[in-house]
Image (cartoon, rainbow, N blue to C red):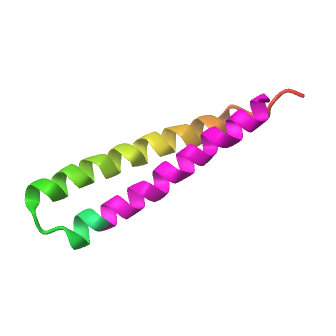
Amino acid sequence: MSVAMLRMYISFAGIIFLFLAVGLIYLSRHKLSSGILSGITAFFAYTFMVLGGLIIFYIVFSGPTPT
Protein backbone atom coordinates (compact mmCIF):
# COMPACT_ATOMS: atom_id res chain seq x y z
CA MET A 1 0.00 0.00 0.00
CA SER A 2 1.40 3.35 -0.97
CA VAL A 3 1.82 6.28 1.40
CA ALA A 4 -0.84 8.27 -0.44
CA MET A 5 -3.43 5.49 -0.04
CA LEU A 6 -2.57 5.16 3.64
CA ARG A 7 -3.06 8.91 4.15
CA MET A 8 -6.38 8.70 2.34
CA TYR A 9 -7.64 5.99 4.68
CA ILE A 10 -6.39 7.90 7.72
CA SER A 11 -8.25 11.01 6.51
CA PHE A 12 -11.41 8.92 6.07
CA ALA A 13 -11.08 7.85 9.71
CA GLY A 14 -10.83 11.51 10.71
CA ILE A 15 -13.92 12.40 8.70
CA ILE A 16 -15.85 9.50 10.23
CA PHE A 17 -14.79 10.64 13.72
CA LEU A 18 -16.10 14.14 12.97
CA PHE A 19 -19.46 12.84 11.69
CA LEU A 20 -19.71 10.55 14.71
CA ALA A 21 -19.03 13.52 16.98
CA VAL A 22 -21.83 15.55 15.38
CA GLY A 23 -24.28 12.67 15.81
CA LEU A 24 -23.32 12.05 19.41
CA ILE A 25 -23.53 15.73 20.32
CA TYR A 26 -27.00 15.90 18.80
CA LEU A 27 -27.98 12.75 20.68
CA SER A 28 -26.57 14.08 23.92
CA ARG A 29 -28.24 17.49 23.75
CA HIS A 30 -31.63 16.72 22.25
CA LYS A 31 -32.54 13.07 22.69
CA LEU A 32 -31.15 11.99 26.06
CA SER A 33 -32.77 13.35 29.20
CA SER A 34 -30.67 11.50 31.76
CA GLY A 35 -27.83 13.61 33.13
CA ILE A 36 -25.27 10.83 33.53
CA LEU A 37 -25.88 9.17 30.16
CA SER A 38 -25.98 12.52 28.42
CA GLY A 39 -22.66 13.50 30.03
CA ILE A 40 -20.97 10.24 29.01
CA THR A 41 -22.24 10.62 25.45
CA ALA A 42 -21.05 14.22 25.32
CA PHE A 43 -17.62 13.17 26.62
CA PHE A 44 -17.25 10.60 23.83
CA ALA A 45 -18.55 13.10 21.29
CA TYR A 46 -16.00 15.75 22.19
CA THR A 47 -13.25 13.11 22.33
CA PHE A 48 -14.12 12.03 18.78
CA MET A 49 -14.21 15.68 17.70
CA VAL A 50 -10.73 16.39 19.06
CA LEU A 51 -9.28 13.18 17.59
CA GLY A 52 -10.91 13.81 14.20
CA GLY A 53 -9.68 17.39 14.15
CA LEU A 54 -6.12 16.34 15.02
CA ILE A 55 -6.14 13.68 12.30
CA ILE A 56 -7.39 16.10 9.66
CA PHE A 57 -4.93 18.77 10.85
CA TYR A 58 -2.05 16.30 10.52
CA ILE A 59 -3.10 15.11 7.06
CA VAL A 60 -3.61 18.62 5.69
CA PHE A 61 -0.45 20.19 7.09
CA SER A 62 1.89 17.24 6.50
CA GLY A 63 2.07 18.26 2.85
CA PRO A 64 1.91 16.26 -0.34
CA THR A 65 3.28 12.77 -0.56
CA PRO A 66 6.64 12.31 -2.23
CA THR A 67 6.46 10.91 -5.73
Q: Could you tell me which residue is drawn at 10 percent across and 54 percent down? A: 36
Q: Nearer the viewer, residue 60 or 38?
A: 38
Specify whether 58 is left or right of 44. right
Q: Give the x, y percent position of residue 37.
A: 15, 56
Quadrant where the N terminus sits is top right
Q: Give the x, y percent position of residue 29.
A: 24, 67
**Magenta span of residues:** 1-26
Residue 30: name its quadrant. Answer: bottom left
In the rendered image, the vertical position of residue 28 relative to residue 59, given as above or below: below
Q: Could you tell me which residue is drawn at 60 percent across and 34 percent down? A: 58
Specify whether 38 is left or right of 15. left
Quadrant where the C terminus sits is top right
Q: Main secondary structure of the magenta part?
A: helix
Q: Nearer the viewer, residue 66 or 24?
A: 24
| Residue 50 in magenta stretch | no
Residue reaching furthest to the right: 67
Specify whether 60 is left or right of 41. right
In the rendered image, the vertical position of residue 45 relative to residue 5, given as above or below: below
Residue reaching furthest to the bottom: 30
Specify whether 13 is left or right of 6. left
How many dots with numbers? 0
Q: Could you tell me which residue is drawn at 77 percent across and 35 percent down? A: 4
In the rendered image, the vertical position of residue 38 relative to residue 66, given as above or below: below
Q: Give the x, y percent position of residue 34.
A: 10, 63
Q: Give the x, y percent position of residue 45.
A: 33, 52
